[in-house]
Image (cartoon, rainbow, N blue to C red):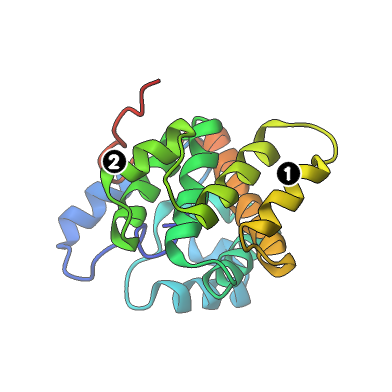
Amino acid sequence: MPCFDNVFVLPVALQLTEFIKWQINIMGRLKQCNDDELTAPLLKRLQAHTGKRAIAPVFREMGNSSLALDSYLTMEQSVASCSLDEREVEAIKLLVSEINRCEFCLSVHTAKATAAGLDVSQQLAVRRGEMTGEVRLDALLELTSNLARAQGPMNTDQLEQARQAGLSDQNLMDLVLVVSTIFLTNTFNHINDSDLVLPAAPVAGA
């Protein structure tokens, strides 16, 4: 999904009975908005986002606020074309989801991180806050951890170290975008208590 992109949408090949069962069983705390309850522009945007696949319940639950869902879709669209590559984006999303203990997002982004080229050992290292051995990625993850955990302005030395690792000011702003996007979905899933649609992420351990 993105957390709700195409990981969340239903394959066209699902039989009707399977689709009904999926709709009934995969539910959160918030109401699922039907098509009539979504604004026409938002419904059109969701249909474009999911293609020929059915709109997943998680989108319909987020749709209780048209502004929130529309903003989320815009943020994910921006993340997809930002200056950070897919591996970096998924590593950041895994780390923030681990810090925020969002099991739903960890499940989704474990699958997406694997597709992006991060193996299981790398994913677990990211979630534990361990060094990956990649200078640029480690700099991004250190900044991510600081942003997600600390309060107040970032230390100037930390910012300078990130720049020495090759991060541009554009990279830094795109990092803010990715952290903000996954924090939005983490928070939504905490409120919604969204059911997992993929296998649970492995336990990261200490």
Between 194 and 101, the residue placed more toward the observer is 101
Q: Which mark is residue 61?
A: none
Residue tagged by mark 1?
158
Disc 1, SS? helix
State the residue at coordinates (31%, 37%). 201
User: Relative to residue 81, is residue 58 depicted above or below?
Assistant: above
Furthest residue to the top?
206
Taking depth in this image into account, of 146 and 184 the one nearest to the observer is 146
Type of amino acid at the residue the image marks with label 1: Gln
Residue 78 position, x and y percent, is 61, 71
Q: Earlier in the sequence, mark 2 or mark 1?
A: 2
What secondary structure is marked by label 2? helix
- In front: label 2 or label 1: 1
Q: For label 1, count other residues whose C-alpha is less than 10 Å away and answer few (under 14), some (14-19) or many (20+).
A: some
Image quadrant holding the C terminus, namely top left
Q: Residue at x 67, y 53 (%)?
A: 162
Q: Quadrant of residue 86?
A: bottom left
The residue wearing badge 2 is 121
When the figure is inspected, residue 70 is found, relative to residue 94, above or below; the finding is below
Residue 172 located left or right of residue 111: right
Distance from the alpha carbon under mark 2 to that under mark 1: 26 Å
Q: Viewed as shown, does residue 145 lie left or right of 189? A: right
Residue 126 lies in quadrant: top left
Decide if residue 103 is in sight here. Answer: yes
